[in-house]
């Protein structure tokens, strides 16, 4: 059997669970073949069945995340536009302020 605490990759677990679901071999035979405990295989199978729905919801979730991303990108574009507008206004005000200062100085003379 596998050493205590040994970790198996997702692909390995998937392969073992698929073989179990095909029902061509018993749980004990599969456990012996892959050198894994029956308890581990049963746990993997239960996880697989519990999370199997997520495979079919992937497209919905993907679309949802893409929509959220697009909304955030639109918001960022608006913020960039606002920053550009405010930068122009500040530059214009600085220039006007300098012009006003020059006018005041020339009137004092």
Image (tube, rainbow, N blue to C red):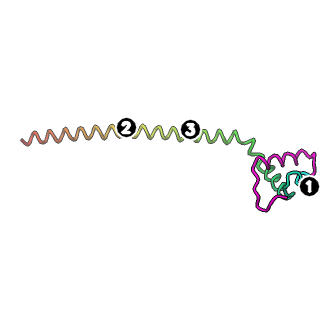
Q: Which residue is mark 2?
A: 85
Query: Which residue range is magenta in the image?
Result: 1-26
Under circle 2, the secondary element is: helix
For residue 58, the mark is: none
Determine the residue positioned at 25% across, 41% down: 94
State which tag comes first along the sequence, 3 or 2: 3
Task: In the displayed orientation, state which residue is furthest to the left.
Answer: 109
- The reply, left or right, for residue 13 in relation to residue 25 is left
Whole-angstrom CA distance, mark 3 to mark 1, is 50 Å
Indicate the quadrant containing the C terminus: top left, top right, bottom left or bottom right: top left
Q: Please provide percent x and percent y for residue 61.
A: 67, 42
Say which residue label 1 marks: 28
- Specify whether 37 is left or right of 75: right
Give the residue displayed 14% in from the left and 38% down from the top: 103
The local secondary structure at tag 3 comes to helix
Name, please, the residue furthest toward the bottom.
4
Q: Nearer the viewer, residue 71 or 13?
A: 13
Label at residue 70:
3
In the image, 92 versus 44, the foreground residue is 44
> Would you place residue 84 above or below residue 47 in this image?
above
Query: Is residue 23 in the magenta section?
Result: yes
């Amino acid at each position: 059997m596998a050493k205590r605490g040994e970790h198996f990759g997702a692909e390995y677990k998937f392969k073992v669970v698929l073989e179990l679901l095909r029902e061509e071999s018993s749980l004990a035979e599969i456990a012996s073949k892959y050198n894994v405990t029956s308890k581990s295989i049963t746990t993997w199978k239960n996880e697989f069945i519990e999370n199997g729905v997520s495979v079919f919801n992937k497209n919905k979730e993907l679309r949802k995340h893409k929509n959220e991303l697009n909304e955030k990108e639109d918001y960022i574009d608006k913020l960039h536009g606002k920053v550009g507008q405010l930068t122009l206004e500040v530059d214009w005000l600085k220039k006007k302020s300098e012009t006003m200062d020059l006018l005041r100085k020339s009137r004092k003379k």
